[in-house]
Amino acid sequence: MNKSLQKIYFDPYLFFSLFFLSTLGLFFLFSASNSDISIVSKQFAYIVVGFIIMIVVSQPDPDVFRRSSGLFLIFSLLLLGITYLVGPEINGAQRWVRAGPFSFQSSELLKLAVPIFLANFLFDKKLPIQRKEIIISLLIICCCFFFVFRQPDLGTALIIACSGLFVLFLSGLSWTFMGGSFVLLLISSPFIWNILLQPFQRQRIATFFNPESDPFGASWNIIQSKVAIGSGGLLGKGFGEGSQTQLNFLPETETDFIFSVIGEEFGFIGVLLLISIYLFILLRCFYLALSARDRFCRLVIGGLSLTFAANLIINLCMVVGLLPVVGMPLPFISKGGSSLMSLFLAFGIIVSMGTHKKFLPQ
Amino acid sequence: MIFEERQVEKNNFSIRAVLLFGLMILGLMAVLLQVFSLQTSGYSDYQLAALNNKNYAVPVQSLRGEIFDRNGKALIRNQPTFDLITRPNLILDIDSFLEKIQPVIFLSENEISKYKKLQKEKAFVNKELVLKTDLSAEEIARFNVRSFNFQNAFIAKRYRRISDHPEIFSHVLGYTSRIENDFKSMPEIPRSHWKDAELVYAHGLIQGHTGLEQVYDDHLSGRHGQRVYEMNAKGQFVKPLSFTQPAKGLDLYTNLDIDAQKSAAKFLGNRKGAVVAIDLESGGINVLYSSPSYSINELSNGMSENSFQTLLNDADKPFFNRALQGRYPPASTIKPAIGMYGLSNNIVNWDFEMKDPGFFTLPETGRVFRGWRKGGHGLVNMHKAFLVSSNTYFFSLAYQADIVELSNHLSSLGFGQKVCLDCFEEDPAFVPTPEWKYSIMNTGWVKGDTVNLGIGQGYLVVTPMQLANYAALLATKGQYSEPSLVALGNQKKLLRTWQDERFNNSDWTKMHQALLGVIESDNGTARSIRDLKDFQVAGKSGTAELVSLDSKEAYQELRSSELLRDHSIIIAFGPMPNPRYAVSVVIENGESGGAVAGPVAIEVLKSLINE
């Protein structure tokens, strides 16, 4: 412990796999943006900054994060409030907060703040978790979900809810409670459909179940995405050779649908490589979670890495037509600073939680 | 926390973490599986869908073949003209563009409004749009000096289908017209792409309409080429991908003769009628003319709706092809056929004589059939009956005929059927039979009907084409070729034979002598045309009565109405004794066959023979 002051906390597996992943992402982005070098260099700058943030954030002791988790949550919610009051409206949604030349999607921070706060709230509670704690946790999750949902940003709101629920589940939520709430969710689903969902969100879900109903309207995106991936074949059409991508038949190639670009231009081989890297990262996080020094660290690593995984899988499932369209970027690949920053921040915290060891006094 | 509790918590966490991480890995596997299935089993479908997204094929119009006469002179050719073409999607302000170009190239109100309307529809893609067609040399020069001012406009070559003799060949050649359903010729190109076809004709996508242009449309039209563009999601052309050259249509070499057709038109003048001439050696049709006519140049290259309606509603029916579709009673020109029947059935022979009092009385009813000359021709045998065109002789002959056999005989000579190999919409016209009369008029065939048939009046109707075919049969003594417009070249001529063992070679010789006498002897009915030429011609003229009248006086009254006057008809062949050409002429309401239709036939024969 006395030596820890000189030690640099660093996980080579995560560092190099993330490095490989984001470098690969730059190549994909180059093709997806029709060779727009300015987009790629901007993304490159974000990645460099991201790695610095990750390394810096890895250094403090987990206790620092634990003690500041409340402040972090309040700060995140405040930022969300500011967005709500003064944020510019882009495409009918208020998601961004501006500071000088930089703009940041404020909801990204909640993806981190909610699981860390809940981990702090639950790590010293006795098993099984009591009803009072469950209700408090659910209330916090619901509030955060609702604030983001109102922006409206269903994708991020769902991820925030997931991040909280993962922590709640990992910390020992009773099985009977979960069964009961599942039944409750089923019963209330018509209410959610009719009252909570915006018309365009309902449209997307309807489209998902019957994509051929409106090939030039709402289901255009998903049809073109499947055409892009399917026409890539096993080997792909080659870098910069995907007609769906280069001739703009595929929408949102730089952001949500960048995976279709990879599928089209690099085929199944490219997809396999990409998913292998993600899988490796996930397994490494799983190992770190199991070997973490205490319950708080376990919960945070579990919560953050599962949030990352959920984010990834929702994006992939949407793009290949297994889920309805929700706005969600592909982690470390899609264009966008906010998403990258919060991802590197999350992995910085994961590394901190996973590499700081504390030996119990005998 | 005490150690045991910590251990319990840790185990609890591990189980739940395995569950959630396992779920996530399962999700990743599901995605991988879905991608694999899209890229393997769905590959061909999706690859096709991706190609259909981006590949935009447009047809490239082929040039039609040209049509030539028998001397290799062009009847219809493709004439290059120059059009001003714009790229409407690159022109931002259409009004100022038009204002700027007005002083260089004159545009009518109509052209401007039409252009503006089309511009709106086509501005989206990089499509060419014609602003003005058929520029004059002066306009081209003016534009070329200032072309730097108009980067989105250029001059390009477009063809027109032009005949140098547009008025006289209209019926036989036909014209070309714009079509909307050419997409059937290239099913691989989607229907909607045809509006972007690359055109070589100023009139657009055209196909043959009537005449040779239609009959030989496949031969003439060639095969369209194809240009494939890459198109982006906005529907803009990105770059050309591939190009298949169009195959030019094949030229058509016909048996038509420009000079002979010209004389037919010249000597028919503005009278209604038709002329058909056949080359006896080949069966080739040298002349096929119907009057009145119209200009195919205008029709082929875009005629205004008004002019078209005027033509269509003209009381003289210029679109009506009298040579192939005009139904006329053959009148006295049928007499050689009746004579052939009488000789082969032993009803008469060349020596048989009878008295012609100027009329024939039907024994059964006492009905009187009059000849054309009051008092008759005295004693007539068959030779004289042809020369003076004795009606009484042929009434009496027909009276002894069996109508069914006579009908079959007439059919064997080509009447009541199509005789031309490649004519457009030839009318088979009509040979009457007792069954026909019963089914149409619900009354039986009577002897009087057969008697009328003996001089080509009554129910029998024939076309000028059939008359020419019949003249060719007479001229060749039954060994004739099937008439055709297009030169068949090395192909075997379609020889036809009319044969009857009871009608032998000496009968043919006598027949030729008689028909020669009709024109060349002192008492032939068509002797008035004898001196128009320096070779000998055989033939038979006729006057088709439109109204059956008993006296000349009554006809004089009728003459005042032009449309009720008799048609004059002649069939002729020459030069005798070894004829090379046969010709038929019908002039509606022309009266007196030999004197009216005769000169036209002679002039056509002259221009054919003297070539």
Image (cartoon, coloured by chain):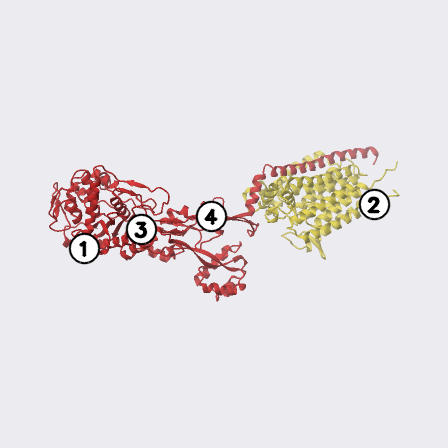
Chain colours: A yellow, B red
Residue B456 at least partly seen: no
Residue receiving disc 4: B247
Kindly identify the amino acid type of the residue bearing the numbered disc 1: Leu
Could you confirm whether marks 3 and 1 are on the same chain? yes
Q: CA distance from mark 3 to mark 2?
A: 105 Å
Residue B210 shown left or right of residue B395 in the figure: right
Q: CA distance from mark 2 to mark 1?
A: 127 Å
Tell me which label, 3 or 1, sits earlier in the chain. 3
Q: CA distance from mark 4 to mark 2?
A: 77 Å
Element type at mark 2: loop
Could you confirm whether marks 4 and 3 are on the same chain? yes
Foreground of the two, A248 or A113: A248
Residue A208 coordinates in the image, percent (x, y): 59, 42
Residue receiving disc 2: A8
Residue receiving disc 1: B558
Residue B435 coordinates in the image, percent (x, y): 23, 38
Residue B224 at least partly seen: yes
Marker disc for residue B288:
3
Q: CA distance from mark 3 to mark 1?
A: 31 Å
Element type at mark 4: loop
Residue B534 coordinates in the image, percent (x, y): 24, 54
